Image: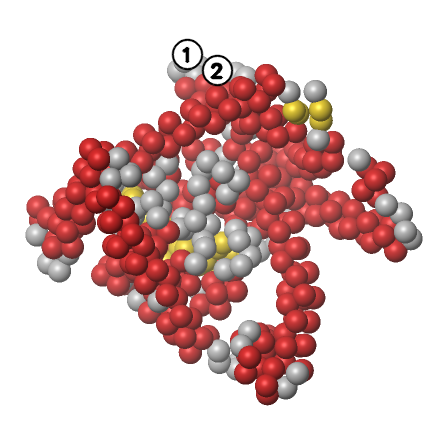
Amino acid sequence: MGLSKQNALGRREIILAIAAICATLTLLDYFVKTPIVYDLSKTVQNWAVVGAGFAMGIGLVNLALNNSRHITRRTPGRWQYSAWLLICMVVTLAIGILGSQEHPMFKWIFGNIYSPITSAVYASLAFWICSAAYRAFRVKNLEVTVFIISAFVMMYRNVPLGGMISPLIPALGDWILYNPTSATNRGIMITAAVGAIAVGLRTLLGEERVYG
Amino acid sequence: MTFVKQPVLVLLVVSLILIYYAMRSAMEKLPKIRTIPALEAFEEAVGRAVEMDRPVHYTTGGSGSLFNKTAGAILASLSIMSHVAKLCARYGARLITTHRQAEVIPIAEEIVRTAYIAEGKTEDLTTDIVRFLGGSQFAYASGVLGILQREKPAANFAIGRYGGDALIVVEAGAIAGAMQVAGNATYGQMPFMIAVADYALICEEMFAAGAYLSEEPRLLGSIAGQDYVKIFAIALIIIGVIATLAGIDLNAILS
């Protein structure tokens, strides 16, 4: 493998070797069905779960540091939100750790605060789509014209009104969905899969030097 | 002991093609890679941020994780982020990177630190460049919304793995007046990003971007290898279509 001359430990090579061994075990489990490979792969995956737990701790520290900086500096129009974020984070964390995720208070926070807020942000997508459509749907060239026509056909296909206006609308919508869209999606999937394999190979072979 | 034959064969062939063309490029002449407009726009975007004295925002997406099959997209995004970090360090633009995945934070911090050290701009390194915005998709989207509206970046790089948050991020960037380069590994959200962003990296281009920007012979060779793998895939599709039309059950033969 060639250890670095400056560093006898070969830090980068050791990290690459660990990554390659773990990735090979996980990949082997997918393709070769034996008990020993399965056990080793599951062990590696369990270590990954533990690592993810530590990573969440690092994320929490990052969040706390960034927001406490705004509080200490009294950043105008910002520090109040940072204070509120930290209070909510500490309260939820305390209830979750001291009382477990089955605690009624934890479930109440999740069901009555977190879930509705998540749904509200997701629902706001409708307005973002309108805003994007208002700016993007300008007939400038042939491609945009086809884009706009397809978008309207698909929108009307998905509501009963489209079928009431004309049976051609759902038929055309189905043709667009099951022919050019499907074909394009599958082509993109194949190329994305090849790209992902290439990135994985480059990372495991140490060619992607951005990771140290 | 059982082997799952077909996927092994496909993965082996794909890997061999990629490795062969990577090695060939290192030893012989470089393949000619077409210009990708989105990647050529990186310097323009960072330059715009420097001129307007506004930050550059880079985000890796509200979906995906390094612990499942979506890791490739996150890794590709981090590879691109290192180039953006180097440009920001070189030209003196303020950089903000935001992430949903906690496991990405230490990697992102290391990437940014390495980029700034490489450009000799360690004095511009601050601890608030890399920001964790919470582990859930829409908490992340809300955080990005807030940053885009408050900080008003001049350049917004939304490259990574996105779900329903894709349109929120790029539309908020457009409203903030940022020049945007978007890239997504999932085709479902791609149309939204293409419609709103100034430049788009469509799936495969995102995976090739890191190699393209590095200009290293082996990495450029792997991009050429990807094209030959696609030719191999097209050949398989044609063989499959002909076999199906001829009434031959290829599935039974291969298994």
Asked if one can make out residue B56 in the rendered structure from this viewpoint, the answer is no
Q: Secondary structure at mark 1?
A: loop
Residue B227, horizontal then vertical, whole percent? 68, 47
Quadrant of the image for the N terminus of chain B? top right
Quadrant of the image for the C terminus of chain B? top right
Q: Residue beneath label 1, please?
A: A8
Q: Tags 2 and 1 in contact by the CB under 8 Å rule?
A: yes
The residue sitting at 66% across, 83% down in the picture is A167
The residue sitting at 41% across, 19% down in the picture is A11
Left/right placement of residue B236 relative to residue B192 reads right
Residue B101, horizontal then vertical, whole percent? 37, 42
The residue sitting at 27% across, 46% down in the picture is A107
Indicate the quadrant where residue A164 lies.
bottom right
The residue sitting at 47% across, 33% down in the picture is A209
Asked if one can make out residue A116 in the rendered structure from this viewpoint, the answer is yes
Residue A139, horizontal then vertical, whole percent? 52, 82
What chain letter is assigned to the residue under label 2? A
Q: Residue beneath label 2, please?
A: A3
Q: The residue under label 2 is which amino acid type?
A: Leu
Residues indicated by labels 2 and 1 sit on the same polypeptide chain: yes
Indicate the quadrant where residue B57 lies.
bottom left
